[in-house]
Amino acid sequence: MTKPTVFINPKSGSIKITGEVDVVDVDGKVIETLTNPKICGCGLSKDKPWCDSSHGEYVKIVASALRNARELVKPCNLFGSTPVRAREIRENELKHRIESGETLVGVKVGGALDSTKKDSPTYTTIFGYLTDAMQCTESVRVASMIYPRAEAEVVFKLSKEISEEIHPSQVLDYVSHVAAGMEILDYRFGEVEASAEDAIADNAGAAAFAYGAWVPAHQENLDALSAEVFVNGECVETAPLTAIQGNPWLAVVEFSKLAAATGVKIAAGSIIYSGSATTGVHMVAGNTYRVEIKGLGQVEVKAS
Ligand code: FES
């Protein structure tokens, strides 16, 4: 008898067994024998554990659940399932925002738990999109966010489109200006640590951003500077900028690798948030938050 084979569809998450298999109970007693069964790996089937093709609606359902989570300010438990699906959900969210009149202005780089490395937790680089509607200047409304946090980052302004991998020695050819930045995240999976797929589906938690005055980019040693986060004038977090990829300029390189691998293009004039130097600071309405990077600049917003 030919041995059954298993195919896990990397796009839908469905698990197709080709051949005849016995379904057994906890004692190993055969309940039924099935030929070519298909098992649900996406979690949406109404006939679990079997796949009923609901996976075809996965992107639409999860994207809409994530939007509802933001509207209801309530964490969502439906996420990315596979890397391909996660990216589709992120792209769906960007499409929805653009159709609603927003403009893509850049990306944010971040880190998330790599679920493929079971033995030792490691982090992988991901990115999310930033639109003009996410920019705040003096104030940000955190009361309608899920677990909002402020992070200190470096912001890069691009002088050239990024669509291919760039070498670290080329970074200054692609960046015209840099600034001190504050990124505000509102992870829609709440306070639990998310897998990379979930974080990608959640657009890397991007909720809002603010940045200080631009300074011309030059190989001013960003890796020799430190970032501080203040709450109502009191410093609560400090970290060297080397906490960002070992050197903040490398965030641009890491983004270029992701762009090249997934066919994403970010235009000249766009911004890239580097990923955080500091631990995220939980934001509460009524407080004032400031990021300072001595030698680069500062940015301050009032939370409401
Ligand atoms: S994988 Fe098909 S319904 Fe879930």
Image: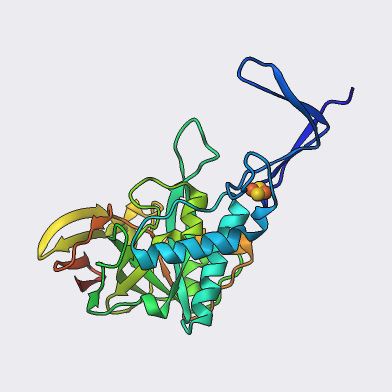
Seen from this angle, which residue lies furthest left?
Answer: 233
Residue 225, quarter of picture: bottom left
Rendered-image quadrant of the C terminus: bottom left
The front one of 91 and 178 is 91
Which residue corresponds to the image point at 59% horizontal and 52% vertical from the top-left?
A: 83
The answer to whether residue 302 is seen in the rendering is yes
Which residue is most to the bottom? 101
Residue at the spot x=58%, y=64% of the render? 60
The residue at 38%/65% (across/down) is 70
In the rendered image, the vertical position of residue 1 relative to residue 12, given as above or below = above
User: Relative to 248, is 254 on the left or the right?
Assistant: right
Q: Quadrant of residue 24?
A: top right
Query: Where's the N terminus, which quadrant?
Result: top right
Q: Between residue 54 and residue 88, name the one nearer to us.
A: 54
Query: Where is residue 105 drawn, in percent x and y?
Result: 45, 78
Q: Position of residue 15 (x, y in %)?
A: 70, 41
Estimate the x, y position of residue 13 in percent, counting from the top left.
Answer: 65, 47
The residue lying at 35 percent from left, 58 percent from top is: 74
Query: Please, is residue 120 above or below residue 46 in the view?
Result: above
Tell me how the rendering is colored. Answer: rainbow
**Lateral position of residue 160 relative to residue 111, left or right:** right
Q: Position of residue 201 (x, y in %)?
A: 51, 58
